[in-house]
Amino acid sequence: MKKILISFLLATFMLAVGPAIADSGAASEVSQRDRIMGAIMGVFIGDALGVGTHWYYDLDGLRNDFGPWISDYHDPKLDSTGEFAKVHQWRHDQGVRAGDLSQTGQLYRMLVESIVDKGGYDRADYAARVDELFKTLNGKNYSGLYTDSAIRETWKNRNAGVSWDDPMVGSNAITSDAAQMNVALAALYYADPETLARQANSHTKLFYHNDFPITHSVAYSLVVGGLIKGVPLEHMAEHINGINVRVLTQNALYYDSRIQVETGQVAWDEDLRFNKPHLTSLVYGQHCEIQQLLPGAYYMVHHFQDDFESAVLSAINGGGNNMARAALTGGLSGAMVGLSGIPERLITGLNDHEELLELAEKIADLTQD
């Protein structure tokens, strides 16, 4: 019965909003409710697509292990030829399989669940949930489903007794974990960018104390929020600059980082755009730093404005930290095309997709008057 209800939910969206949008002028026809659910599910999809194919910095090795084009979810390989074969082995040994989430995906789902349970963002409630996860970790990278640097450093600080309210509780890393999580806040506060900026800043500071990733993570949330609101990409920097300047500078310090979304406009120039968009990773960078990941994600949604599948799969096939790049791209593209614009196979291929869809729907319900 539950699967029937989920199928009915997907069918209802398809009938109400229509198939994937055919042109950018039709994008305004996607309902905000559809965009909210698309953004939330887009992060889950991007994360899960990458968890089995993560950290191949040699694209020949990626093709050797997964074929010429990754188009679906994969198990982490036991016989990986990649530089980070030990990580793939570890995840496989922990039971990670095609359609599962990474640890960052777990943390994101915990935030979505907290918002649903509390009827809004409750920082203390979410932090308590993170503490429960931290009890299962040992502070090392080979812990849980594999623990990245920002989470390891935060774990260390919490175990040293640093309060969640201490501005130094987070890490000095410059990765994108919090940015991906901030999509849930963008879905909740898209109609009030000032509140979104404050809440995204507060949430990001759970895991980072460095103003650089904080600014990028808050700015990313404002882009996702703007897309949910229906702001066209060509007016996104203008939209962000229209937010109260005091709020912006208090919560996203660096001006250039706030308008980084404009970098993707190179995709609109016939002479400059990439013939093989997945290779943008070789230009912007394949690594885990947020300043490498976000330009790639922004490029994908400028290049594939109405094509969620092509945007996210191009992010995956660029290798490196493709998991984070695809999750960031999924949040952006899902906010543009809506749930109805995401291929059903990418939704149903997620493990626990019924529960994830219900969570996304409940967050959409919270935004309704």
Image (tube, rainbow, N blue to C red):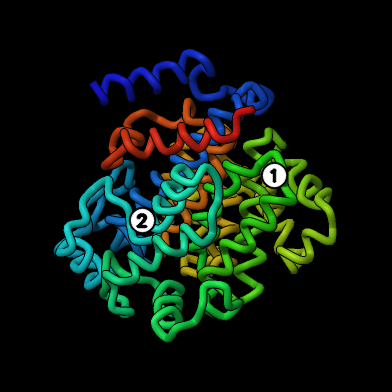
Q: Position of residue 41 (x, y in %)?
A: 44, 40
Does residue 137 lie above or below 327 as drawn?
A: below
Residue occupying image coordinates x 25% and y 52%: 66
Q: Which residue is mark 1?
A: 269
Which mark is first along the chain, 2 or 1?
2
Q: Position of residue 346 (x, y in %)?
A: 35, 36
Residue occupying image coordinates x 29% and y 73%: 137
Is 156 left, or right, of 228 in this rendering?
left
The kind of residue on which mark 1 rests is: Asp
Is 323 left, or right, of 229 in this rendering?
left
Image quadrant holding the C terminus, namely: top right
What label does residue 199 carry, if any?
Answer: none
The kind of residue on which mark 2 rests is: Gln
Q: Which residue is mark 2?
A: 106
Residue 276 seen in render: no
Relative depth, front residue between 129 and 232: 129
Q: Position of residue 270 (x, y in %)?
A: 67, 42
Crowding at mark 2 (Cα within 10 Å: few <14, some 14-19, many 20+): some
